Image (cartoon, grey):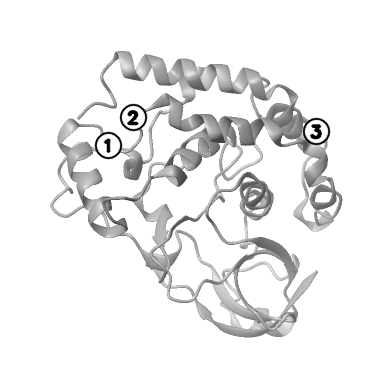
Amino acid sequence: MLKAVKFVGFIEPDRATSKCFHVTATDGRDWVVRARKLGYNAKRLFNEYLAGMIACEFGLARPKVQLIRIPYKIFKELDENDFDNSCSIGAATEYVEGLELIPKPPNSTNIDWTSPAFRVKNRTHLESILGPDYSFDQFYAQRVFADWILLEDDWKYENLHITPENTPIFLDLDFAFNGGGWKDLPHVYDWIHMFSPQAPYCEGIIKELSLFEPWFNKLRSLRKEMFQQAIDTLPMEWEIPTNYLDTLMNLLFGDINHFLEQFEYAFEIKIGMNEFLD
């Protein structure tokens, strides 16, 4: 397990949607850390870590994640009214130097994000940043992955960032698995909850069912055994409820084909309602 050795500073608000901090760890590299906050459970740490591990195996463009031990001397440099130092293990996401937020399309504040006008504006905006030949393959990956892991706050443009190499990456998985609390999970997937709402940066981008196929195949190749080590080493101090992990892993991996059938059906319904057309 990593150990934080130096507090570098807090992450600017436009780089994270919750209070995260930047540290140097025992591996000599820099990491962005989520720690348990006073008065809250550790569900968002669990989400960021486990969903991040699965995302990297799936092939979604995002930094890798690890567990990290936070010594008391680091907590002393943080706001003691914010963080619970009795929980010394956090979720660490690899720090990407020069990472920037991709801004929303200009003059789009008062436009309905599901409208044809926004779809055209959004695609033009992203092509101007990523280039007219960019395939948007990763956006298709994000779309199927978000519904599979029950990502609750998928609607934010602030989840989309870009590296100095002009590669888009997707951050903030801390609201995966039905959000920030240990809420009951569904036993099966239901199409009615898919594409609703769609991430705004996908508007005008997601149009062809066939372009999901490589990601459907990748999803079918995943097995829960791939993540057994991550599960076996989850911290006791995160206080994961009894049977929660079994229920979650059975949902994710018990019948992937059923999820994909529901996803395709939801897409076809949206197409029939002209929701993806410009």
Q: Are marks 1 and 3 in contact (CB under 8 Å)?
A: no
Looking at the image, residue 149 sits to the left or right of residue 70; the answer is left
Q: Amino acid at mark 2?
A: Lys
Location of mark 1 (residue): 204
Q: Quadrant of the N terminus?
A: bottom right
Asked whether the viewer can see residue 210, the reply is yes
Structural crowding at the residue carrying mark 2, measured as other residues with C-alpha within 10 Å and reported as few (<14), some (14–19) or many (≥20):
some
- Image quadrant where residue 95 sits: bottom right
Q: Amino acid at mark 3?
A: Asp
The x and y percentages for residue 119 are: 22, 37
Structural crowding at the residue carrying mark 1, measured as other residues with C-alpha within 10 Å and reported as few (<14), some (14–19) or many (≥20):
many
Asked whether the viewer can see residue 190, the reply is no
**Residue beneath the point at 15% across and 44% down:** 110
The x and y percentages for residue 155 are: 38, 42
Looking at the image, residue 215 sits to the left or right of residue 87; the answer is left
Of residues 223 and 243, the one nearer the viewer is 223
1 vs 3, front mark: 1
Which mark, by number, is residue 246?
3
Q: Tell me: residue 132, above or below residue 18.
A: above
Which mark, by number, is residue 207?
2
Structural crowding at the residue carrying mark 3, measured as other residues with C-alpha within 10 Å and reported as few (<14), some (14–19) or many (≥20):
few
Q: Tell me: residue 137, above or below residue 130.
A: above
Earlier sequence position, callout 1 versus callout 3: 1
Count how many numbered circles sit on residues in the image: 3
Looking at the image, residue 41 sits to the left or right of residue 88; the answer is left
